[in-house]
Amino acid sequence: MNAPEIQADQTLDARGLLCPEPLMLARNRVREMRSTEVLHIQATDPSTRRDFTNFCRFMGHELVREERLGDVYHFWIRKG
């Protein structure tokens, strides 16, 4: 059974970028968003799994979902 689709308010394509660029771009984007809006991020750097998990924990955001499709990691972050 497939997981339900998550409606993203904004998207960020960070494919091909290396740490810390995906995190910095996501941080800046989330800063501009309103509370409860969702950002969908696509990234190829494996370290983004750790980075986005810690980012959400420390900044009070919710990592709604994380998945890997081939070489691309997908993250859905809801702004706290």
Image (cartoon, rainbow, N blue to C red):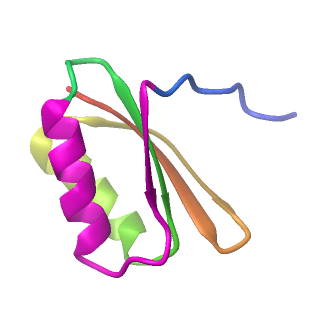
What residue is shown at x 31% (from left), y 65% (from top)? 22
What residue is shown at x 22% (from left), y 27% (from top)? 33
Q: Count the marks: how many? A: 0
Q: Give the range drawn in magenta.
A: 9-32
Q: Which image quadrant for residue 7? A: top right
Return the residue nearer the eye: 55 or 21: 21
- Residue 64 pos. (x, y %): 45, 35
Q: Does the magenta stretch include residue 17?
A: yes
What residue is shown at x 66% (from left), y 74% (from top)? 71
Return the residue nearer the eye: 4 or 39: 39
- Say which quadrant the C terminus sits in: top left
Q: Which image quadrant for residue 11? A: top left
Q: Does the magenta stretch include residue 20?
A: yes
9 is higher (above) or lower (below) than 75:
above
Return the residue nearer the eye: 21 or 69: 21
In this view, which residue lies farthest toward the right? 1
Q: Is residue 57 visible?
A: no
What residue is shown at x 32% (from left), y 55% (from top)? 53
